Structure formats: C-alpha cells, structure tokens
C-alpha cells in the first residue's frame, strides 16, 4: 500500500500560550518550516496557513515545497486571529464578515496556484462565550451562509469545515459532527464537507470512529487529521500516544468504508522536537496500517454482529499488538 501522509505546516512552528507569551522557541519563517517538514520521513503533503508573511511570494513557497519534495493538500485561511475576535462568518460587523470572505477567497486562489484540493475552514472564533451573548438563530444562520457563499464562489474546489467543541471561543458554532453535518446538509452544496479531527471528536465526547462513519454515510468526509489528547482539551499531542485503540478503530472504520485520502497530522509539539514528533506519529500510523492488514475482518464482523466486546477487542489487540 502506498498510503500518503500529510501534516499541517504549523506542526513545525514554535508556539506561544497564555503563560509563555514570548513563545517556546524562536519563531520560524514559513520557508524554514517547509524545509523542516521535508526532513520528516514519508511526509508527502502539507496544509499551509494563509496569509503568510508579505515578503514571501507564492513562487518562493512553491520553490521551497519542490526542494522539500512536498505537495500541498489545502490552505487554511486564518479566520481565527485577533481581527476576528468576535467571529469571522458570524462577526456582528458586516465589514469583518466581508473581510473573512475575502481572505478565504484569496486562500482559494493560493490552493489553485499550489495545486491543492481544499480550503480548510476552521472558524474557531465563531461562537459565543457567555449566556445571552448572542442570538443563536442569527449566529447559526451566519455560520451557514458564510460557508455556503464560499462554496458557491469556489465550485471548482472543496471547502472543508473542521469542527471543534471550543477554543478559542468558549463554545464554537460548528462544535460537533452532528451539528456540522446538519449545517452542511442545509447549505446543500456538493463541495462542502467535513475535515474530521480525531482529537476534536475525542475531547468533544464523541467516538471518533462513529463520527467518521456518520460523515461517510452522508458523503461528507472530505479529510481528516489525527493527534491525541487527554480528552479534556485539544492538546494536539503525538498521535497514538494516549488513545491507540480508538485511533485503530478510527482507521479500521475508514478502511471498512474504502475511504481513500491522506492521513494527516495536526500536532502541536510545544516541548518536543517537531521532526521527531512527526516521525513517531507516522511510524505509529504505519503500525496501524499493518495491523489493518493482519486483522481478521470476517471474525471482527461476526463479533460485532453479536456485540461481543471481548472477542472484538481480542481481535483488535492481536492485530495491533501481536498474538
Ligand atoms: Fe485539526
Ligand atoms: Fe485542534
């Protein structure tokens, strides 16, 4: 099998949080991050944030990607920064809502120039913090209209919505698989789908494999990324370190449905070496791939037909850890 692996380019950034406000390392330029990503074993594609520094041209990015042997899967417009503190698609100021639309359309042009397939919408500031802060009907209407408008303006591309329960807003409007599907179905356009982040599903109290199945059943699973967390927050830790069995079940579900796509990393190695963290995650994803080859699929189907948890988990453990 030649499974393709990808990563968000932010995996190779240095980070700040609300305590280490000057960052956990020296900032890196996009070109440096691409160069680092190129040293990860078996990484084929990256997702790049937009806009990047104005002194770097699209041609320079393309050149750096070629040198690193990487392609672009999609572009993530930064509709979640200070300018959008009260929302991008749902901002009370129509001028800022327009600005969000423009930024996403610019990102779509970069997708075309770099040969990617999607614009990733992560509306992290679209939501609310306090009771009585928003009119829920208006907020949800704007959430859907913002995505729908972009989808109709860019019918040649995919628009993927990455849902997450919260952060930075205390409650995000696209908070779960069910609500996001409901929104997408009401938009009713073929080029809008979900990018399912394994960690977001986990800490949102979902079973990520079930979330994937639901999105697939609606024909809306357009992309995915993996990481891990302790279930109380979007820790973006190394995939497979905390929830290996649920991660295995997630990929089991993708293969069961013959879902073909890039297996992507969305990790934030705050205190780790970024290249080592990526290599470790991809190494584990390959173990999962081999485990899926070893798994007794018929026996698993039979065990599930009986809801035999012991037999099913014995099969899963044997495939993943050896007999
Ligand atoms: Fe993600
Ligand atoms: Fe996340």
Image: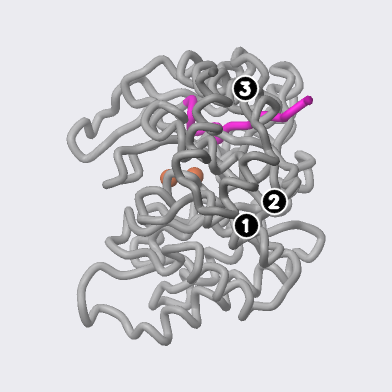
Q: Position of residue 221 (x, y in %)?
A: 65, 56
- Measured in 3D between alpha carbons, the distance from the residue under mark 1 to the one under mark 2, in whole angstroms, is 7 Å
User: Residue 10 lies in magenta, yes or no?
Assistant: yes
Q: Secondary structure at mark 2?
A: strand
Locate residue 272: give its quadrant.
top left
Pick the front one: 10 or 27 = 10
Please, is residue 18 above or below residue 269 in the view? below
- Determine contact: label 1, label 2, CB under 8 Å: yes
Q: Residue at x 79, y 41 (%)?
A: 115
Q: Earlier in the sequence, mark 1 or mark 2?
A: 2
Q: Residue at x 55, y 35 (%)?
A: 8
Q: Residue at x 38, y 64 (%)?
A: 172
Q: Which residue is mark 3?
A: 286
Q: Which residue is mark 1?
A: 160
- Measured in 3D between alpha carbons, the distance from the residue under mark 3 to the one under mark 2, in whole angstroms, is 25 Å
| Disc number lying in front (3 or 1) | 3
Please, is residue 126 above or below residue 245 in the view? below
Please, is residue 219 above or below residue 69 in the view? below
Q: Which residue is mark 2?
A: 118
Q: Position of residue 24 (x, y in %)?
A: 29, 23
Quadrant in which the C terminus is drawn: top right
Q: Which residues are magenta?
A: 1-12
Q: How would you rate the neighbour count of disc 3 (Cα within 10 Å): few for under 14, some for 14-19, many for 20 or more?
A: some
User: Residue 159 lies in magenta, yes or no?
Assistant: no
Which quadrant of the frame does ligand 2 lie within?
A: top left
Pick the front one: 187 or 147 = 187
- Measured in 3D between alpha carbons, the distance from the residue under mark 3 to the one under mark 1, in whole angstroms, is 25 Å
Q: Position of residue 295 (x, y in %)?
A: 64, 30
Pick the front one: 159 or 314 = 314
Please, is residue 78 above or below residue 140 in the view? above
Q: Secondary structure at mark 1?
A: strand
């Amino acid at each position: 099998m030649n499974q393709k692996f990808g990563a968000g380019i932010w995996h190779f950034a240095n980070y700040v949080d609300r305590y280490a406000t000057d960052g956990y390392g020296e900032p890196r330029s996009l070109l440096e991050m691409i160069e680092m990503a190129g040293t990860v074993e078996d990484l084929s594609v990256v997702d790049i944030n937009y806009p990047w520094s104005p002194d770097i041209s699209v041609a320079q990015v393309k050149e750096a990607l070629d040198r690193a042997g990487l392609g672009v899967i999609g572009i993530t417009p930064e509709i979640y920064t200070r300018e959008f503190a009260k929302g991008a698609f749902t901002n009370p100021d129509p001028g800022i809502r327009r600005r969000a639309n423009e930024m996403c359309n610019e990102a779509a042009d970069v997708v075309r120039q770099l040969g990617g397939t999607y614009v990733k919408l992560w509306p992290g500031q679209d939501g609310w913090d306090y009771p009585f802060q928003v009119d829920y009907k208006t907020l949800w209407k704007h959430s859907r209209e913002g995505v729908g408008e972009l989808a109709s303006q860019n019918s040649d591309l995919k628009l993927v919505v990455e849902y997450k329960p919260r952060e930075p807003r205390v409650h995000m409007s696209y908070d779960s698989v069910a609500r996001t599907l409901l929104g997408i179905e009401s938009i009713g356009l073929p080029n809008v789908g979900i990018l399912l982040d394994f960690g977001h599903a986990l800490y949102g109290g979902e079973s990520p494999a079930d979330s994937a199945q639901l999105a697939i059943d609606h024909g809306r699973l357009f992309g995915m990324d993996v990481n891990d967390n302790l279930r109380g927050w979007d820790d973006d830790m190394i995939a497979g370190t905390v929830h290996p069995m649920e991660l295995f079940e997630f990929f089991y579900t993708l293969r069961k449905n013959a879902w073909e796509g890039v297996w992507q990393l969305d990790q934030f190695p705050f205190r780790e070496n970024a290249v080592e963290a990526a290599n470790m995650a991809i190494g584990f994803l390959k173990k999962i791939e081999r485990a899926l080859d070893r798994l007794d699929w018929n026996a698993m189907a039979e065990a599930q037909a009986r809801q035999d948890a012991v037999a099913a988990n014995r099969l899963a453990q044997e495939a993943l850890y050896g007999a």
